[in-house]
């Protein structure tokens, strides 16, 4: 489910979520 959230938000937000 996390993958979907990351894809939905975008690559920029993905970094924030991972970091």
Image (cartoon, rainbow, N blue to C red):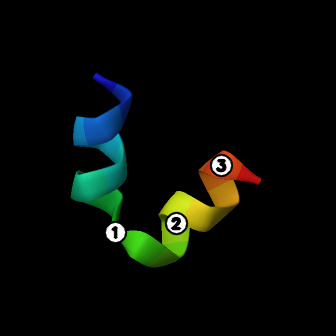
Residue, x 65% and y 48% (percent of image)? Answer: 18
Residue, x 52% and y 66% (percent of image)? Answer: 13
Question: x%, y% of residue 5?
Answer: 31, 41
Quadrant containing the N terminus is top left
Question: x%, y% of residue 12?
Answer: 50, 77
- Of badges 2 and 3, nearer the viewer stands 3
Q: Which residue is situated farthest in the right direction here?
A: 19
Q: Which residue is situated farthest in the bottom direction here?
A: 12
Question: x%, y% of residue 3?
Answer: 30, 38
- Left or right of residue 3, residue 16 in this image: right
Residue, x 25% and y 55% (percent of image)? Answer: 7
Quadrant containing the C terminus is bottom right
Image marks 2 and 3: residues in contact by CB distance under 8 Å = no
For label 3, the crowd category at 10 Å Cα-Cα, with few meaning under 14, some 14 to 19 and many 20 or more, is: few
Quickly name the residue at label 1: 10
Task: Give the structural element (helix, strand or loop) at label 2.
Answer: helix
Question: x%, y% of residue 17?
Answer: 62, 49
- Left or right of residue 6, residue 19 in this image: right
- Of badges 3 and 1, nearer the viewer stands 3
Image marks 1 and 2: residues in contact by CB distance under 8 Å = yes
Quickly name the residue at label 3: 18
Disc number placed over residue 13 in the picture, else none: 2
Task: Give the structural element (helix, strand or loop) at label 3.
Answer: helix
């Amino acid at each position: 489910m996390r993958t979907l959230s990351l894809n939905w938000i975008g690559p920029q937000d993905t970094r924030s979520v991972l970091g």
